[in-house]
Amino acid sequence: MALLDLVSELTGTVPGLSPILAEKYCQRAWQHIRNKRLWAFLSIDGAIVCPAVVSTGTVSITQFSATVALDATASAALLAQSTPGATPGITNLQIRFGATTPAMGQVYNIVAADITVPTAIVFTLDRIVQEATNATSGYQVYRCYVTPPIPDFLKWESVVDMANSLRPKLNYSSAFFDGMDPQRASQGLAYYLGRYAGVWVPNPVTFASSPNPNVEQGSMIYELWPHPTQGQVFYVRIRRRGTDLLTISDEQPEAIPDDLIISRALYHDVYPFVGANVANFPSFKGVPIGVLIQAKRVDYEDLLQTAKRNDDETAMQSVFNRGHGLRSPRNVFKGDDQGFPVDSNYLQSHLVRI
């Protein structure tokens, strides 16, 4: 059912209810239902491209400046990524400085590229350069920080490098990598993916934020480690949060019945609002609002269970209890996401402590 029809049903059920308020209640109900489960329709796949490292030519850096000037050789090597529409694009790449390979300088995010003069490209970084001024500094440009390929990202389900038969381990953080490789000297093929940041804060005094131009401010950004300098393409499976119904003609997925949204909106928002403003709803005077709320709540719970059962037919997951020791990862604190075997043969042949 389209959003317009959901709103019309609410305003028809409760004469006098504002259509604007009814739409808000429908959106709130739809959001609540999306958060009740990892619905099958919220699963999607995509790709993350990490091009091979570029280090030809030199760059001119000035300590405590956020701009970097490339020489003609470096400009030619990076012009293709600096052009609008490139994949992944220069603002999805990072740069670091130093005379050795791997470069031992800090990792900076490129937030803008001025290609007015194609033979003398100028990058703007997310923060000021800490390394000493050098008019002919060596450098490396590659991608080690990645953003999810969708705006309503919830979690990674799987990340796979099919070309190299690698499955990077998840559930780490950049702080964990700091302990193992504080200089980020490990480069090559990445086999870890960890949380990095949600928003850039280039000014530690004022805390002024400078969000990554490729992701909404506050969205999570992740680090690949070792830093992928050989060039990797990752196939990813993702769980989405889902989005609101943006126009009056938008419809919720078929797996979610209309009555589920209507019942949630009625018991959680509409009837309590009517009860608090009964003087403005003459047809509800003397009606036991509490009874209506309870009846619709029962309807909602019943419809929700039916929807979950139907969703299990598409992607079974209700049998998994993520907090149960037997079904948790073997080394959950180390990020191993391979679960225990839990068939009867395993349980009968092992001493299992619960």
Image: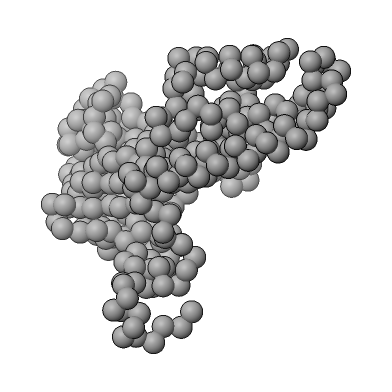
Residue at horizontal 73%, vertical 28%? 271
Query: Looking at the image, is 119 positioned above or below residue 189?
Result: above
Residue lying furthest left in this view?
163
Say whether residue 168 is visible.
yes
The answer to whether residue 23 is above or below residue 142 is: above
The mark total stands at 0
Quadrant in the picture for residue 181? bottom left
The answer to which image quadrant residue 121 occupies is top left
Q: Write the residue at 54% across / 20% down.
A: 6
Q: Nearer the viewer, residue 103 or 255?
A: 255
Q: Residue at x 28, y 46 (%)?
A: 236
Give percent across and percent down for residue 54.
Answer: 20, 45
Where residue 292 sits in the image (x, y, percent)?
72, 32
Residue name at image x 47 percent, y 30 percent: 257
Residue 319 position, x and y percent, is 41, 59
Query: Quadrant of the rendered structure where residue 136 is?
Result: top left
Q: Coloured how?
A: one colour
- Give left or right: position of 336 versus 53: right
Residue 141 visible from this viewpoint = no
User: Residue 335's x, y, as percent?
Assistant: 38, 66
